[in-house]
Structures are given as structure tokens and as C-alpha cells.
Amino acid sequence: MSASETIFVTGGAGFIGSAVVRRLVAETACQVVNIDKLTYAGCLDNLLPVAQHPRHHFIQADICDQPAMRRLFQEHRPRAVLHLAAESHVDRSIDGPAAFIQTNVVGTATLLETAREYWRQLPEGEQQSFRFLHVSTDEVFGSLGPEGHFTEETPYRPNSPYSASKAASDHLVRAWHHTYGLPVLITNCSNNYGPYQFPEKLIPLMIVNALAGRPLPIYGRGVNVRDWLYVEDHVTALLTVLERGQPGETYNIGGHNEKTNLEVVTLVCAILDELQPAANGRPYDRLITFVADRPGHDLRYAIDASKIARELGWRPQESFASGLRKTVQWYLDNRWWWEKLLQERYSGQRLGVLASNAGGLP
Ligand code: NAD
Ligand code: DAU
């Protein structure tokens, strides 16, 4: 990406978006316009490494705000949009689906329509090089049994309000390509983990609970399987798809790391036993507690990532053992980051148990 290019990153104050922003600033010459509403999940501390950088431009804005989006396109004239802004947590979508419909569906439609207006009036060469990369999830495919993998041809069968809203947004992106010719790309990725992940998600929640001596809540019997990908591998995949992906195509991204939740939490405990033994000398896995299952809990996700490997040459570089160790070490070294979030935004309570309908649909 050259110095004359501007890239929009939506959701660039979140977990994955901030990793994209940090990488773009560190390893390319482009201007990065970071558009984020700063919801509970958006955190400017994630951007401290690039806060003063002259090529990083942070703008607090809502992707649902079309006049604001129009102004940004006209002012900054991007070559590409990397769209990561979303409500991302399944448990919160059970408690309150409305925000998911608003940002993930309405927000994506707003951004697509604004991008189309802008793209339409570009000179032909710039129209051809423009890209809209929509970052989505493997959860749109629903749940697998013990066998099989999601491919790009797997039919969509979303089961949670979160995955249904992401599926809807994927369909909108596809439609804007087929109907209007907008040069879009879609990626469907498995579970990410790594530094700066908000402590509501499984791995960081287990780390911070264990360090506080609190129970480690495992939903159901802990047999649900996720495929784990280190966040920096996801960033590399996204930049690869942006540069070499075929407009109109979708690409599955996964880590080839299928683990049950019980295996993941047991491994987190073992790493903590080694790096930061509990003061009372007892192993952390004594804190594992089985709790009521997540409503509609998908049993298993597994990604067939052979298309992106074959066509674009991307493969994950980080093993789960090394990536998880780095992640645990990062949370140990950066207590200030998550202690502030726990104090100000989320204190580790159980979400998504149908106890309330606050924020539900009208
Ligand atoms: P996150 O919750 O950490 O960050 C989301 C960011 O979007 C936050 O900074 C938030 O402030 C911002 N945002 C929310 N609503 C907005 C709005 N209306 N306008 C502007 N900004 C808004 O999420 P994440 O885990 O970094 O996920 C990023 C994207 O990747 C999402 O689209 C998610 O669906 C997708 N994804 C995530 C994973 C994963 O494991 N975390 C896996 C596959 C795909
Ligand atoms: O698959 C990709 C998706 O991965 C992304 O699209 C989502 O944005 C991301 O949040 C993630 O969704 P999950 O629901 O898989 O992630 P979560 O960390 O919430 O849960 C992972 C698994 O662990 C899941 O099976 C539920 C379970 N779990 C989770 C929490 C928070 C527990 O057993 N206990 C917990 O306390």
C-alpha cells in the first residue's frame, strides 16, 4: 500500500480492528482513517502504540450516521474500506439484539450505500482498484456435528441474534456487488484470540478470573468446539485478501486449531500455573465451574481454509500453544489495560442467560 493511498478501518478501536490499524501503520506507508463509535468495546488504549503517529487519523463516528460517513468519504477519498465495526459478543446479542441489528445490519447497509455513491463517481482506474472488505464470522454457517468443516459453499444457518445479524450483513454486501458492481470481498473467520481482547470473551475472561481467584465458568459440559486463530494471523489474512482477493469472492479463514472449551480453559490454567502460580500454591484448574449452558449454543465450528491457502497463499503461522502463551503473558504484563475495563465497563458477570430483556427489540 503506497503513501498516496488512504485506507478506512471501521471498528479500529476494537480487538481485531486495532490490530489491523497497528499493522497498517507499522508496515505500510498508507494513511489510516480509523472510524469507531467507541461503544463499550472500543478502547483508545488499544491504539496507544499509534496514537501520535502522523498517518493514523482517529475519528469517533457511528457507521449508521450516513451524513457523517458521506463527509468522511468525500474528505479522505479512500482506496479501500476494511469494515470491522460491529457488535461482536454472542451473549450480549441474547440479552439485547437491537444494537446488533442496528450496527451490524443497518450500519453495514449505510456504509455500503455511502461507499457506492462515492465509488460511482470515481475515475475508471480508481473504480477498478477500490475495495470494500467486509469482515465476517464462521458463525453464519451455524453448527456442525462431530465431523465436517465449513467451506465457502456451506449454506448459511445462523443460530444466534449475533450470527443472524452478521449473516444479514454478508448478504447485503453480496447484493451490492451483484446489483451495483461494487468491488467487495467477504471473509468468514473463526474465533480470534490475542492481546487487547475485551475480557467478556472466553480466553481473556478465564485469565482475569483465574488471577482474581474467581470461578472459571464453563457453559454446559465444556464440550463445544471452536477453531482458534491468533489475531495477528487474522490481520495478515485480511491484508492478503485486500491486496490479492478476487472482487465478489468470499474467503474462509481459520487456524486449524479445533479445541473443546474445556481443553482451552485447562490449557490457560496450565500456562498460568507456570507463569504466575497462585499465591496459595494450588492449581488454577480447581476454579473450573460448570454453569448453565448458553441458549442456542452452537456445538462445533471448524473451518476449511484451503481456498485462501490455494488461491492467495495464506496460512496461519502461530501454533495454539505458542499463541496462547504469548496471550497469557500479555495479560500478565498489561494488568492496567484490563483492570481499568473491569472497573469502568464490565466486571465479569454472566451475560446471555435470558434473565432480562433490557435493550431488546421494541
Ligand atoms: P470488538 O467488539 O472488539 O470491536 C468492535 C469495534 O466496533 C469497537 O471498537 C466498537 O466501538 C466499534 N463499533 C461498534 N458499533 C459501531 C458503530 N455503530 N459505528 C462505529 N463503530 C462501532 O470486535 P472484534 O472482536 O474486534 O471483531 C471485529 C469484527 O470481526 C466484527 O465484525 C466481528 O463480527 C468480526 N469477527 C470477530 C471474530 C472474533 O473472534 N473476535 C471472529 C470473526 C469475525
Ligand atoms: O467464531 C467466531 C466468533 O467467535 C466471532 O464471530 C465472535 O465475534 C466472537 O465473540 C466469538 O464467538 P464465541 O461465542 O465463539 O466466543 P466466546 O468467547 O463468547 O465463547 C467461546 C466459547 O466459550 C463458546 O462456546 C462459549 C464458551 N464460553 C464463553 C464464555 C464467555 C464459556 O464456556 N464460558 C464463558 O464464560
Image: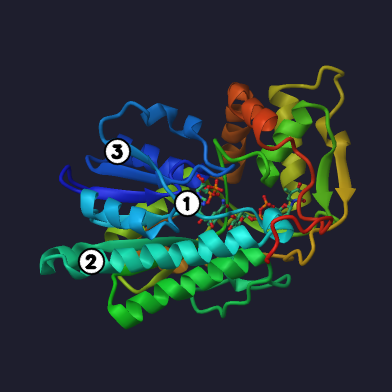
Q: Is residue 137 visible?
A: no
Location of mark 2 (residue): 119
- Distance from Cα at disc 3 to Cα at disc 2: 26 Å
- The residue to which callout 1 is attached is 316
Which residue is identified by label 3?
27
Q: How many residues crowd around disc 1 within 10 Å: few (fewer than 14), some, or many (20 or more)?
A: some
- Residue reaching furthest to the top: 279
Q: Residue 300 in the image: x percent, y percent?
A: 70, 65
Q: Residue at x 22, y 54 (%)?
A: 74
Image quadrant containing the C terminus: bottom right
Marks 1 & 2, CB-CB < 8 Å contact: no
**Residue 148 spot, x, y in % from top left:** 64, 73
Identify residue type, mark 2: Trp
Q: Give the vertical position of 68 relative to 48 (above or below).
A: below
Q: Which residue appears at 82% of the width and 31% of the height? A: 284
Callout 3: SS: helix
Q: What kind of element bears circle 1?
A: loop
Which is more toward the observer, 312 or 354? 354
Is residue 58 depicted above or below 130 in this figure?
above
Residue type at tag 1? Pro
Nearer-the-camera pick, 94 or 270? 94
Q: In 3D space, how far apart are the residues under numbered discs 1 and 2 (Cα atoms)?
A: 33 Å
3 or 1: mark nearer the eye: 3
**Residue positioned 50% across, 42% down in the render:** 38
Crowd band around label 3 with a 10 angstrom C-alpha radius: few (<14), some (14–19), many (20+): few
Q: How is the image coloured?
A: rainbow
Label 3 vs 1, first from the N-terminus: 3
Task: Please tell me in which quadrant of the rendered image residue 101 appears.
Answer: bottom right
Label 3, label 1: how far apart the Cα atoms are = 18 Å
Residue 158: horizontal and vertical position, in percent?
63, 72
Q: Regarding mark 2 in the picture, which secondary structure is present there?
A: helix
Q: Is residue 320 above or below residue 272?
A: below
